[in-house]
Image (cartoon, rainbow, N blue to C red):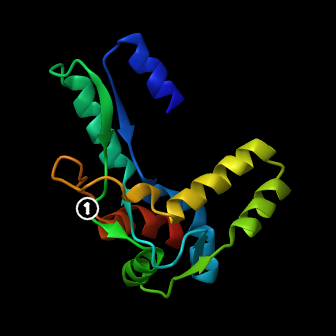
Amino acid sequence: MAMDDLLAGAGVAYRALACPSFFENLLEEAASIRDEGVFSDAVDADRKAPLVAVADIAAVAAGLLLDRSWSDAGSVPVLGPRDLSPDDLARIMTEQLGRPVRYEHRPLGELRADLVGHGLDEAFVQGIVDMKRAKNEGLDAGVARTPDTTGPTTFEQWCAETLKPAVLS
């Protein structure tokens, strides 16, 4: 936000891509999904939110770089085809991987302790905890999905093409 304000104040034309969580964040959980059939996060199991594939974000960015018709400042939301909850993700992963996958909710205090235990800076950890809390309170639900804001990659497609090879390797 501060950087956006600084850029806007400079009078330059720019676009800030506004993206929710990425499908690719689940790749950090590939070993846990493979070995234990579980992935975890600090959001409620039924909290639906937009997620998007990084390839869809890259396509929007490339399109903006090639489009010389805009000259102002602003944000461009990039959302996936539909909102999904962690329970939805687990169900789809189970279908796509052919093995049970379940979601495990991690309390924010536990997340904080783990991150600090790994030696991460206290201010950085607080930023992560604050972001996770905000996401659980609906941070990513503020943008309406339209044809212009919707990426084409479904979670099912991403699982088949990206997650499955990572988990089953």
Q: Position of residue 42 (x, y in %)?
A: 61, 68
Classify residue 98 as left or right of residue 109: left
Res. 169 visible in picture: no
Q: Residue at x 41, y 11 (%)?
A: 10
Vertical comparison of 11 with 23: above or below: above
Q: Position of residue 128 (x, y in %)?
A: 65, 52
- Can you identify the residue that label 1 sits on? 81
Q: Residue at x 25, y 61 (%)?
A: 81
Res. 161 visible in picture: yes
45 and 62: which is toward the camera: 45
Q: Residue at x 27, y 58 (%)?
A: 153
Classify residue 73 as left or right of residue 125: left
Q: Residue at x 44, y 70 (%)?
A: 164
Residue 96, by quadrant, is bottom left
Q: Secondary structure at mark 1?
A: loop
Q: Position of residue 142 (x, y in %)?
A: 35, 54
Vertical comparison of 94 with 162: above or below: below
